Image (cartoon, grey):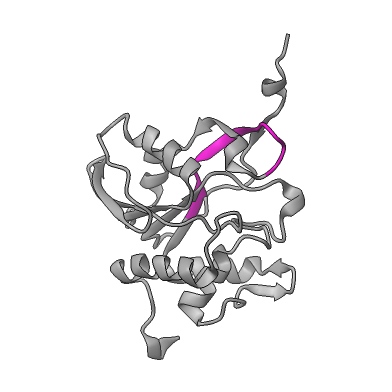
Amino acid sequence: MVSQNEIAVEQHPLGFFLPENTRLLMLGSFPPPRSRWSMNFYYPNIQNDMWRILGLLFFSDKDYFLEAPRKFSEAKCKEFCRAVGLGIGDTGMAVVRQKGNASDKFLEIVQPIDLSAVLREIPHCNAIVVTGQKAMDTLLAVISKQVSIREPEVGGFTSFIYDNRELKLYRMPSSSRAYPKPLQEKAAVYQQMFEQLGMLPKKDEK
């Protein structure tokens, strides 16, 4: 008999977005249900603040990536990632939504990221940022099969060596509205990471 969980396994709907110049790999857990998408790209839910955080930091405009009041611009988001060297993906390749919603709390990851395969595609990447606890737990389980690693605090990073490459693992606040922090406070934490990695434009370049 086929179990309900086997029937409900959902494959990742997006491939990794990995520009050739990727310096930072951003990993979440898994996209929300398609009914919540405003574009065919990562962080598509209009209620998620990731693109507002990036707009605020890189363009001094939280609405920079909007092309309509309830729609992000896929083209602008991809152009930005290519320009700054930001790769994006998720830690879950196949999941079961135990409650049928976007909550990480009820997300069971049945197939995790193949980190070695992803890193081979981005030889210039020297940092990974994780944007939620589910994603962090999943990634740590993958990394720990090869090397011992300490979980970074929110806003901080841990250095480690994986596949003979020295990497930094950052833990940033969730960009979900479910994480009860104002946009400006979240952006301030992300700003520290981008400054440490030398990715933010100078003030006169914004």
Q: Is residue 195 left or right of residue 44?
A: left
Name the residue at 73% across, 48% down: 34
Q: Is residue 111 left or right of residue 193?
A: right
Quarter of the view holding residue 140: top left
Q: Is residue 80 magenta?
A: no
What is the x, y in percent for residue 72?
A: 67, 68
Locate residue 129, reporting x and y percent: 40, 54
Direction bottom: furthest residue: 204
Q: Position of residue 76 (x, y in %)?
A: 60, 72
Residue range (magenta): 88-101
Question: Please, which residue is most extreme toward the top here?
Answer: 1
Q: In the displayed orientation, state which residue is furthest to the right.
A: 35
- In the depicted structure, whether residue 187 falls above or below residue 121: below
In terms of image quadrants, where is residue 84? bottom left
Q: How many marks?
A: 0
User: 173 or 109: which is nearer to us?
Assistant: 173
In the displayed structure, 194 sits above or below 62; it is above
**Quadrant, the C terminus:** bottom left
To which quarter of the image does residue 43 belong? bottom right
Image spot of residue 35 (x, y percent): 77, 50
